[in-house]
Image (cartoon, rainbow, N blue to C red):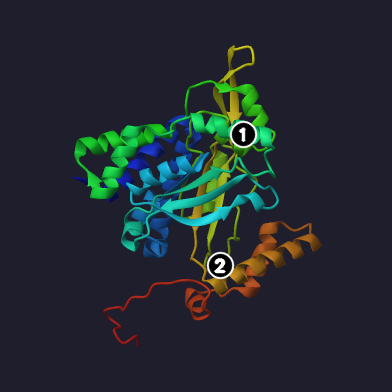
Amino acid sequence: MVETLELRARFARNLSDLYGTEVPAYTTLLAVAEEVNHEVLARLGDAAQRLGSIERVTAERHGAIRVGTPRELSQVARIFGALGMHPTGFYDLRDAAPAPIPVVSTAFRPHDRDQLARNPFRVFVSMLVPEDERFFDEDLSRRLLDFLGSRTLFPHELLALADTAERDGGLEQGAADRFLELATSAFALSPDPVDRGWYAELERVSSVAADIGGVGSTHINHLTPRVLDIDELYRRMGAHGIEMIDQIQGPPRWDGPDILLRQTSFRALAEPRLFREGDGRVVQGDLRVRFGEVEARGVAPTPAGRRLYDRLLVEADDRSRDRADLPREEVLRAVWEEHLPRTDVEMARRDLAYYTFAVRADRPDGA
């Protein structure tokens, strides 16, 4: 029996291998992340593993995919249910500032702490909302719903195996191999030609709408490994000749505890695709949709910690307007140093972040 944990771990590896084949720069990203992680571990020892073992850090990935309808989302839930991954949270990006997107989203991940420690793979899934009149007029909404209703993203065999795996807590070896083969291929980039006119019509509404509803399949939008020193990774990726976005997003690098996460990515690359023209001709073209992201994790804030974090971002924005000559990273660092504790102990005492505690054998009374 191949149990749920192994199915999830193998699926995560399969997707990573697939994405590296489709987007070679992602393979470079993985190699640089692994290199940096091992160097940080060698330099800091156990301190490098304060936010997770090196096994967890090097295995950790999160991905993103997009679907078009509640039916497709329910099928994704069946596939991820077989992997011990459950919908967590709700995000309505239709009101996101400054650029609303016509999707709602959730993240599929394990819930059990032990399962998270052993393989924390998670996938952010966004669903298009064609009925939203803020984005789609009545005619386009109808045609989009018809198109989405006519396609099949996941074969019946895959869904049947997923249901069996969720019910039984795994699959026999042959069935497991087949399930993973089908599940991985379901998220591969399709070689089928893209209808250029239809794609362009949706793209005028939203590039995300076109990526979801302009093609007959789904695919990995991005995968994100975890790194222990994102500043060093950012520098090295540039040295490899890979164009990164302009900055590392999120909190600043500073001398105190990192909070939430910092992330960056390489820019979406032009990927060759076939297009079908209005006259029926199939021609070569390209799309820039997919990218490679990487993240460095910090401590998880409590509600009080998150409120403080949000206030500090507002303060940094205000200061940046007054001091346009200073890099935002420098402004953020100054705000952090003024308002956040410099130690985990003080963060815990002020109830700003979540921590786990264990009794040390040599200090059972805490003295």
* Foreground label between 1 and 2: 1
Using the image, tell me which numbered label, if any, was put on residue 296: none
**Spot occupied by residue 44 in the image (x, y as percentages of width and height):** 41, 61
Q: Secondary structure at mark 2?
A: loop
Question: Relative to the observer, which residue lies in front, 8 or 164?
Answer: 164
Is 261 rendered above or below residue 358? above
Which numbered disc flags the more N-terminal residue, 1 or 2? 1
Residue underneath mark 1: 142
Q: Is residue 137 above or below residue 228?
A: above
Left or right of 140 in this view: 261: left
* Quarter of the view holding residue 199: top right
Residue 321 shows in this picture: yes
- Where, by quadrant of the figure, is residue 327 drawn? bottom right
How far is disc 1 from disc 2 in space, using C-alphas? 54 Å
Q: Which dot marks residue 255?
A: 2
Q: Quadrant of residue 208?
A: top right
At label 1, the amino acid type is Arg
Around disc 2, counting alpha carbons within 10 Å, would you say few (fewer than 14), some (14 to 19), or many (20 or more)? few
| Residue 171 in picture, x, y percent from top left | 23, 43
Residue lying at 65% horizontally and 23% vertically, measured from the top left: 197
Quarter in which the C terminus is drawn: bottom left
What residue sits 30% from the left and 44% below the top? Answer: 163
Q: Residues within 10 Å of mark 1 (few under 14, many from 20)?
A: few
217 with respect to 143 (left or right): left
Please state which of residues 254 and 268 is positioned toward the viewer in this rendering.
268
